[in-house]
């Protein structure tokens, strides 16, 4: 238990090895723009450089989205992200592989793709999108996305959710700026600008992890830094944001129901050629008293509260594509 306490803040982590082929690189900066962790530095016309910051040896969550959006195939990742000890120890196998629905020894997606259902292909190729065109999403398309959510399964068919659709950019910006007031304070306190741990931070964040273990994993801190560097744009200049609210008194597990609903909406959006990114960073600040006026402004009333949100729009260039994923353990009881 003592070791877990010691390893709750800035735990020992092995990051994937990221390399960029300078001969192939088009110097477009798409990897820099799309990385959710702010894991690249880039100057226009130059080759991006993988970086770490604030105590992180590398700022990478191993999503491989940089590889998916690279137009020239210049980026390679090897290895997996592993937190070795403590509260946030990873329990994945470290075995990275592309989609392998037929449990082959050496899966080749290009070969098996034709054997997959349309739904499987959408699941395996969908990527989180952070590069949007300056183009509105039609109300008809938004309605189709909402309908996919409405028909998600829920406990007792209770459908314990509501949706708030925001297409007014000023309101999206206000949600971002109000949320960033809280998020900047948290991440600036968490990160170490000189890369050195401070004893008081270890004590504070270790104790906090015991009170709210899901809120103090180190990885979201990089997303907060990315948003801060991007002028507070948490939603990546998406033309539409959909908030998914849960009814707190819903049957059984309304958070789960809201999550299933969100996944339905995301898959439907990508099937129509839209891009999405599930964004939960603003949800905790949105629940605080400091944002009570904003909640009233956009129509969040008891007994509902925001669970997550979807940034949605037309993708800028190719976003969806095949990546490798780490492998969770599977126990077969036959």
Image: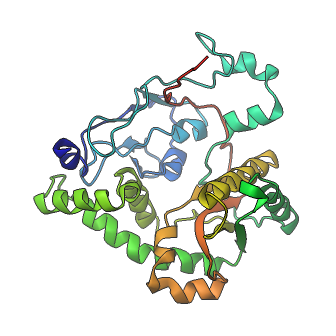
Left or right: 115, with 306 as reference point: right
Residue at the image point whose x is 45% and y is 79% from the top: 288
Q: Is residue 235 left or right of residue 11?
A: right
Q: Quadrant of residue 3?
A: top left
Q: Is residue 2 left or right of residue 235?
A: left
Q: Is residue 14 above or below residue 61?
A: above
- Residue at left offset 71%, top offset 52%: 266
Tell me the quarter of the image containing the N terminus: top left
Where, quadrant-wise, is the C terminus in this rendering?
A: top right
- Tell me where residue 192 appears, x and y as whole percent: 21, 58
Relative to 164, residue 19 above or below: above
Residue 299 sits in quarter: bottom right
Q: Residue furthest left?
A: 199
Q: Identify whether 17 is placed above or below 29.
A: above
Q: Is residue 308 in view from this perspective?
A: yes
Q: In this rendering, would 87 be left or right of 151?
A: left
């Amino acid at each position: 238990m003592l070791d877990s306490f010691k390893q709750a803040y800035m735990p020992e982590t092995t990051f994937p090895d990221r390399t960029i082929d300078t001969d192939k690189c088009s110097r477009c900066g798409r990897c820099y723009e799309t990385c959710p962790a702010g894991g690249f530095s880039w100057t226009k016309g130059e080759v991006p450089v993988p970086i770490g910051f604030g105590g992180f040896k590398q700022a990478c969550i191993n999503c491989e989205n940089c590889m998916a959006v690279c137009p020239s195939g210049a980026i390679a990742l090897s290895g997996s992200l592993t937190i070795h000890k403590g509260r946030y120890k990873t329990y994945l196998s470290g075995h990275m592989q592309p989609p392998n629905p037929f449990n082959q020894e050496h899966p080749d997606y290009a070969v098996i793709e034709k054997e997959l259902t349309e739904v499987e292909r959408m699941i395996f190729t969908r990527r989180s999108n952070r590069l949007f065109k300056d183009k509105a999403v039609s109300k008809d398309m938004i309605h189709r996305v909402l309908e996919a959510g409405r028909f998600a399964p829920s406990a007792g068919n209770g459908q314990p959710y509501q949706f708030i659709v925001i297409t007014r950019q000023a309101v999206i910006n206000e949600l971002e700026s109000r949320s960033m007031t809280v998020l900047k304070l948290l991440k600036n306190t968490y990160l170490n600008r000189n890369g050195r741990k401070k004893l008081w931070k270890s004590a504070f964040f270790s104790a906090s992890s015991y009170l709210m273990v899901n809120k103090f994993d180190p990885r979201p801190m990089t997303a907060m830094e990315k948003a801060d560097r991007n002028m507070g744009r948490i939603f990546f200049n998406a033309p539409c944001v959909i908030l998914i609210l849960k009814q707190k008194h819903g049957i059984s597990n309304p958070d789960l129901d809201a999550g299933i609903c969100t996944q339905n909406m995301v898959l439907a959006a990508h099937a129509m050629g839209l891009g999405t990114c599930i964004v939960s960073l603003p949800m905790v600040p949105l629940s605080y008293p400091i944002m009570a006026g904003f909640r009233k402004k956009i129509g969040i009333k008891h007994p509902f509260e925001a669970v997550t949100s979807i940034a949605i729009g037309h993708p800028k260039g190719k976003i969806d594509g095949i990546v490798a994923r780490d492998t969770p353990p599977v126990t077969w009881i036959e």
